[in-house]
Image: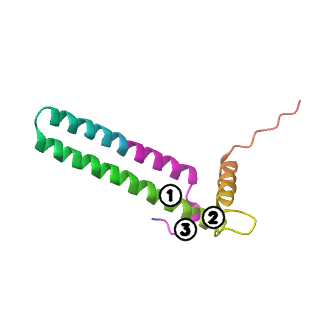
């Protein structure tokens, strides 16, 4: 785990969070369907076990999402300083500015062509 959170790429962090949470939620839905199918087939023991897996996957997706959000916040704080409310700017406004700076920094500068 990096100790210098300011070097973490925020776009990659967001993409990783989205991919991981979506994969876990997809697996959760599949297990819920498998559990319903097993129950309909009369295999209540398997249905219960698969339902527990689905619950664990759902819990894990929430935990991962929360931890990625915390890491994102630490990276923003490391890069742009403490984002606490001030008398004239909310935390949301400061975060929006920080993300806008990150996006702007990631954009390629268009080459100017003489006409």
> Would you call the spot at circle 2 few (<14 residues within 10 Å), some (14-19), or many (20 or more)?
some
Name which of mark 1 and mark 2 comes first in the sequence.
Answer: 1
Helix, strand or loop: magenta stretch:
helix
Give how far across and how far down residue 112 sits, in percent. 82, 37
Give how far across and how far down residue 9 sits, in percent. 56, 54
Mark drawn on residue 4: 3
Q: Circle 1 sits on which residue? A: 69
Frontmost residue, 94 versus 112: 94
> Would you call the spot at circle 3 few (<14 residues within 10 Å), some (14-19), or many (20 or more)?
few
Could you give the CA–CA distance between mark 1 and mark 2, rounded to whole angstroms? Answer: 15 Å
**Mark 3 touching mark 2, by CB under 8 A?**
no
Q: Residue furthest right?
A: 115
Q: Quadrant of the C terminus?
A: top right
Residue drawn where x is 44% and y is 60% of the image: 67
Q: Is residue 88 left or right of residue 21?
A: right
Residue drawn where x is 17% and y is 47% of the image: 49
Q: Is residue 47 left or right of residue 86?
A: left
Magenta span has 16? Answer: yes
* Secondary structure state at the residue bearing disc 3: loop
Residue drawn where x is 34% and y is 54% of the image: 60
Give how far across and how far down residue 80 sits, in percent. 66, 65
**Mark 1 touching mark 2, by CB under 8 A?**
no
Q: Magenta stretch?
A: 2-23
Name which of mark 3 and mark 2 comes first in the sequence.
Answer: 3
Q: Circle 2 sits on which residue? A: 79
Give how far across and how far down residue 31 sits, in percent. 26, 40
Picture quadrant of residue 86: bottom right
């Amino acid at each position: 785990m990096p100790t210098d959170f300011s070097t973490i790429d925020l776009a990659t962090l967001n993409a990783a969070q989205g991919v991981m949470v979506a994969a876990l939620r997809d697996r959760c839905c599949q297990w819920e369907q498998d559990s319903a199918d097993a129950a309909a087939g009369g295999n209540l023991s398997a249905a219960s076990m698969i339902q527990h897996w689905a619950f664990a996957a759902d819990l894990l997706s929430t935990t991962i999402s929360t931890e990625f959000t915390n890491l994102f916040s630490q990276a923003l704080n490391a890069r742009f300083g403490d984002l606490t409310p001030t008398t004239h700017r909310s935390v949301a406004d400061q975060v929006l500015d920080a993300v806008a700076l990150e996006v702007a920094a990631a954009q390629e500068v268009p080459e100017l062509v003489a006409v």
